[in-house]
Image (cartoon, grey):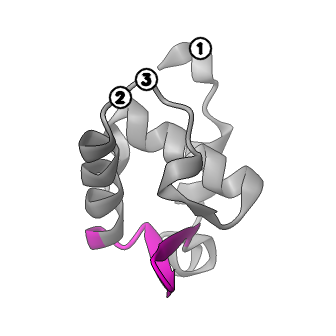
Amino acid sequence: MLHALADPIRLEIVRCLAEAGERTCGTYEMNIAKSTLSHHFKVLREAGVVKVRIDGKHRYYSLRKEDIETAFPGLMSSILAIDKERW
């Protein structure tokens, strides 16, 4: 899980999910290739940071904040409190 959260792009994805709740992969305005963004979501999903809900051809991602807080108390709140400028 810590490896998944060590990347600045994945941290930004986690921060966006924490603010917006559930989002599709295509709603992120990042200057990276779609395949790279998909890879970052895969890493987060396999690490247990996000969960996916499939609706037709869309995949909706959401943060597993409660599960992470149960397993690692204080981790998610600490990560979300990190100042973006310090990355």
Looking at the image, residue 11 sits to the left or right of residue 84; the answer is left
CA separation in Å, label 3 and label 2 = 4 Å
The residue labelled by disc 2 is 32
The overriding secondary structure of the stretch rendered in magenta is strand
Specify whether 8 is left or right of 46.
right
- Dot 3 crowding, Cα within 10 Å, few <14, some 14–19, many 20+: few
Q: Residues within 10 Å of mark 1 (few under 14, many from 20)?
A: few
Which residue lies under the disc numbered 1?
Answer: 85
Mark 2 lies on a secondary structure that is loop
- Mark 1 and mark 2 lie on one chain; the one further toward the N terminus is 2
Report the Cα–Cα distance between label 1 and label 2.
20 Å
| The residue stretch that appears in magenta | 46-63
| Occupied quadrant, residue 65 | bottom right
The residue tagged 3 is 31
Provide the secondary structure element on which disc 3 rests.
loop
What mark, if any, has residue 20 been given in the picture? none
Is residue 39 in sight in this rendering?
Answer: yes
Pick the residue in front: 36 or 18.
36
The amino acid pointed to by label 3 is Asn
Position in image of residue 71 (x %, y %):
46, 79
